[in-house]
Amino acid sequence: MRVAVIGAGIVGVTSAFELASDGHQVTVFERRGSVAEETSFANAGVMAPGYVSPWAAPGLPAKLLRQLLSRHAPVRLAWPMAAGQLGWMWRWWRACQAPIYATHRERMVRLARYSQQRLQHLRLELQLEHEQSSGYLVLLRRAQELKGARTHLKLLAELGVKFHLLDGTQARLIDPGLNPDLALHAAVHLPDAEVGNCRQFAHLLRGQAQALGAVFRFNRSVDRIDAGSQPLLTHCGTASAEAPQQEAFDAVLVCAALGSPALLRPLGLRLPLLAVHGYSISAPLRQLDSFPDLGPRSGVMDEQYKVAISRLGQRVRVAGSAELGGRLDRMHAATLNTLHKVLDDWYPGCAQWAQAQRWKGARPMLPDGPPVLGPSGAPGVWLNLGHGSSGWALSCGSARVLADQIAGRAPMIDVSGLDRARLSG
Ligand SMILES: Cc1cc2nc3c(=O)[nH]c(=O)nc-3n(C[C@H](O)[C@H](O)[C@H](O)COP(=O)(O)OP(=O)(O)OC[C@H]3O[C@@H](n4cnc5c(N)ncnc54)[C@H](O)[C@@H]3O)c2cc1C
C-alpha cells in the first residue's frame, strides 16, 4: 500500500518505520526541516511504564487549586487562554473520577509496557545507541510525600511493576551523585524503567526507515485531507513559495500532534487537544576527576516539584512544568528558576550552566489521558496522536499497533478504549 504519514515527531517516525518494515511504500510529510523539531525535541526522555498515567486523577483538581499561586507550582495558567481551553478543563475535571482514571491508567500502562518492549527489541535488532540508561528514582523529600505515594505503590504492586521502596541512604547507593546534605525521606526505585534521548532515537530510526524505502518530505505542510478509498492530500512547501500539490494514497496516518485538529475538523472529527507547555534545560556535565559521580546515573523525579532530571550521555537535562495557555515563544522566568533550583538541590555544581540550552515544548494533551489510535471514521484516514506527557514512552508500541491495524491484523495487545469513540460526548 502507499501510505502517507503526516508529522515526523517521535510518533510519526516510529510509525513510518513500522509501516516500511511491513513492506508499505511510505511517504512522510513534515512541515519542519527535520524530524523531532517540535515536542519530541528536548523532552525528559523518561520511559517508566509504571508511572505513565493520566493527568486527570482523583483529588488533583483540589490539589492544583491549592498550589496554583505558590512560587514553584508545577501547574500554572498563563495568558492568553488557548482556544477551547475551558471546554478542555471541564472534560479533564470530569475524567478525574476514580473509576475513569483507573480504566485509563490501566490502558496507558499496558501500552507503555508494550512500547518499552518494542523499543528494546528495535534497539537490539538495529543496534541503536540513543544515550540510554537504566533505572528511575522517584525522590520523596518528606514523610508526607511518602504518605501520598502509598496509593500509587499499591497500584504498582497490583500491576506487577517491579519497584523497591528505599530510605535515603539506600537511594544514595543507587545514585551516588545525590546531594548528601539534602533531606531525602524515601525513594521509589524502578530498576526496569529507562531514560533515553528521544530526538536522537527519532534521527536513528528515520535512517532505518529510509533504508527500508520510506521517503521523508521536509518543509512540506499538509493543508487538507480528502478522505476516500484513495485519500487525497493537499500539501505545500513551507520554505519557499510553491503552488499546492495534490497526491493520492491508499491510506493516510495522522501523527501531527497539535497540528491534527485543523486537519481533521473538515472531516467531521473534533479533537479536544490542548497544548500543555513544558520546559527543559540541558547542560553539559562538569567533568571532575576527583568526583566521577557528578550528576544523575539515569533518571530521577522530584515528587514535590514534579521535576524530572535525566542523564543523556555527558549532559544533564532537567524538565517539568505544565502551563495551560500562554505562548510557545515566551519563556516564564520563574519556571526556569524552579528547574535550576531542583537540579542544584539534588546535584549541586554538576551542570555547566553557561552552555545550557533552554527549551519550551507543547504536549499534545487529550483531557482524559490515553492517546487516540486507530481508524478516524473517515475512509482511508488513521490516527496516532494525543500522546500528551508520555509520547516517548508510548511511541514504539503505538506505531506497531497502527501498522498492525492498517495491515488488517489484530495488534499484540488489547487496544480497546484507545480508539476515537471515547472522545465523542
Ligand atoms: C517538558 C516536556 C517533558 C517531557 N518529558 C517526557 C518524558 O519524559 N517521557 C515521555 O514519554 N514524554 C515526555 N514528554 C512528551 C513527549 O515529548 C510528547 O508526547 C511527544 O514528543 C509527542 O510526539 P509527537 O510525535 O506526537 O509530536 P511532535 O513531536 O510535536 O510531532 C508532530 C509533528 O507533526 C508536524 N506537523 C504538524 N502539523 C503538520 C502538518 N499540517 N503538515 C506537516 N507536518 C505537520 C510538526 O511539525 C511536528 O514535527 C515531554 C514533553 C515536554 C514538553
Image (cartoon, rainbow, N blue to C red):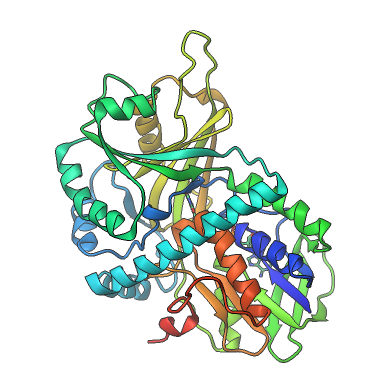
Residue at 52 percent across and 54 percent down: it is 116
Residue at 28 percent across and 59 percent down: it is 158
In the rendered image, the residue lying farthest to the top is 290
Q: Nearer the viewer, residue 415 or 282?
A: 415
Q: Nearer the viewer, residue 128 or 425?
A: 128
Residue 397 in which image quadrant: bottom right
Residue 343 relative to residue 200: left or right:
left
Residue 208 in which image quadrant: bottom right
x and y, in percent, of residue 288 in the image: 52, 12
Q: Where's ligand 1: which quadrant?
A: bottom right
Quadrant location of the C terminus in the rendered image: bottom left
Q: Nearer the viewer, residue 90 or 192?
A: 192
Residue 53 in which image quadrant: bottom left
Whether residue 99 can be seen here: yes
Residue 340 relative to residue 102: left or right:
right
Residue at 55 percent across and 43 percent down: it is 196
Residue 345 relative to residue 244: left or right:
left
Whether residue 256 can be seen here: no
x and y, in percent, of residue 423 in the image: 42, 81
Q: Quick check: 359 above or below 269?
A: above
Q: Quick check: 1 above or below 193?
A: below
Residue at 50 percent across and 25 percent down: it is 353
